[in-house]
């Protein structure tokens, strides 16, 4: 299932990225800790070139901590890249580490007054604006649990004088890797109405059955696990009362229950891919 979701503001956002990126000392690329590879935007990689980059794994409170550790090590094997996991549960970590790392990586700050210039980029709904607010220690950007909340670039200045851009989340015109597209959709980077939602739920059901069976048992109070993704969704639907007229299970609602439990962390800390 190739996904094509490319709203109008993203064309402009990409152009603005291309114009402003060369003027930055450091790029802060925000990735989803649950899927660092799938959430790495090839457009950003291409525009960034060899500029110093901090790969920030956001929402690490939702990801499997052991797998996150392995990802950090993997991401840092690239020259000029440092990697860091953050979570809104511990905003002090981001505040202590990110500006410091920017200073270190920006060996020769190029801006007026020689202050560091950095830019936050990444896919939609990954936590870019939340990170701006964390670093500013107040709300300067709108955030929300849906993709494409930020529609235009915004520049802020930290107390240290460092400048920081927030950007709209950018996708790439066509996501060819079907598995990556399903991960992105399951994590909430693509709007639920832009994709075949039931296949996303079935993808999640198949993955959780294979990798996290005990979590499913605990969450849905199952003694034995259904033997297929479809049967799992049916069972969740029965237990949650997701029924259509005539007592038929509403598979869309059942899928919704599973997807939302995953996104909210109700299934525990889960990573959708390992390095
Ligand atoms: N659990 C958890 N949720 C987070 C974390 N950081 C951000 N979020 C949530 O993720 C959602 C998206 O956050 P935003 O900051 O709006 O994401 P964005 O990358 O700016 O999104 P766009 O502007 O749409 O590109 C919000 O509901 C945040 O509360 C985190 O560390 N942990
Ligand atoms: Mg935003």
Image (cartoon, rainbow, N blue to C red):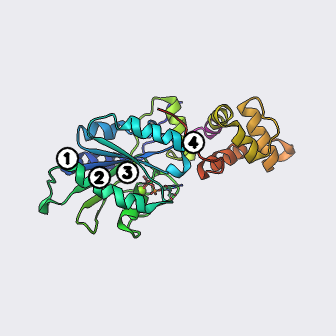
Pointer 3: what residue?
Answer: 9
N-terminal of the two: label 1 or label 4? 1
User: Residue 22, labelled with which disc?
Assistant: 1
Residue 197 among those drawn in magenta: yes
> Disc 2 versus disc 1: distance between alpha carbons?
19 Å
Determine whether the residue tagged by mark 3 lies in a helix, strand or loop: helix
* Residue 88 percent across, percent down from the top left: 48, 59
Q: Which residues are magenta?
A: 195-201
Foreground mark, 3 or 1, reads 1
Name the chief secondary structure element in magenta. Answer: helix
> Disc 3 versus disc 1: distance between alpha carbons?
21 Å
Give the quarter of the image for residue 97.
bottom left
User: Residue 110, labelled with which disc?
Assistant: none
Can residue 173 be seen from the camera position used here?
no
N-terminal of the two: label 2 or label 1? 1
Give the quarter of the image for residue 94.
bottom left
> Disc 2 versus disc 3: distance between alpha carbons?
31 Å
Determine whether the residue tagged by mark 4 lies in a helix, strand or loop: helix
Pointer 4: what residue?
Answer: 186
The residue lying at 39 percent from left, 68 percent from top is 137
Do the numbered discs 1 and 4 sit on residues whose CB atoms are within 8 Å? no
Left or right: 196 as drawn, with respect to 44: right
Left or right: 108 as drawn, with respect to 66: left
Foreground mark, 4 or 3, reads 4
> Disc 2 versus disc 4: distance between alpha carbons?
31 Å
């Amino acid at each position: 299932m190739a996904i094509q979701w490319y709203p109008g503001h993203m064309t402009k956002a990409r152009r603005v990225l291309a114009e402003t990126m060369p003027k930055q000392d450091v790029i802060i690329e925000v990735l989803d800790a649950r899927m660092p590879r799938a959430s790495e935007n090839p457009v950003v990689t291409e525009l960034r070139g060899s500029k110093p980059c901090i790969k920030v794994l956001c929402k690490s409170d939702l990801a499997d901590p052991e797998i996150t550790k392995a990802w950090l090590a993997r991401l840092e094997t690239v020259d000029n890249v440092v990697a860091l996991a953050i979570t809104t549960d511990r905003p002090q970590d981001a505040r202590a580490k990110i500006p410091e790392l920017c200073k270190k990586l920006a060996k020769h700050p190029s801006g007026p007054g020689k202050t560091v210039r950095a830019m936050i980029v990444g896919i939609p709904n990954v936590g870019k604006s939340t990170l701006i607010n964390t670093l500013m220690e107040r709300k300067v950007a709108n955030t929300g649990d849906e993709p494409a909340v930020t529609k235009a670039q915004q520049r802020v200045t930290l107390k240290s004088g460092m400048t920081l851009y927030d950007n709209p989340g950018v996708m790439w015109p066509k996501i060819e890797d079907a598995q990556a597209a399903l991960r992105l959709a399951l994590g909430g980077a693509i709007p639920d109405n832009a994709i075949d939602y039931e296949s996303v739920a079935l993808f999640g059901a198949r993955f959780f059955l294979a990798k996290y069976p005990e979590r499913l048992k605990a969450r849905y109070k199952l003694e034995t696990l259904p033997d297929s993704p479809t049967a799992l969704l049916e069972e969740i639907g029965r237990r949650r009362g997701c029924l259509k007229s005539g007592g038929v299970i509403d598979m869309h609602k059942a899928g919704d229950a599973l997807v939302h439990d995953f996104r909210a962390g109700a299934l525990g800390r889960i990573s959708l891919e390992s390095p």
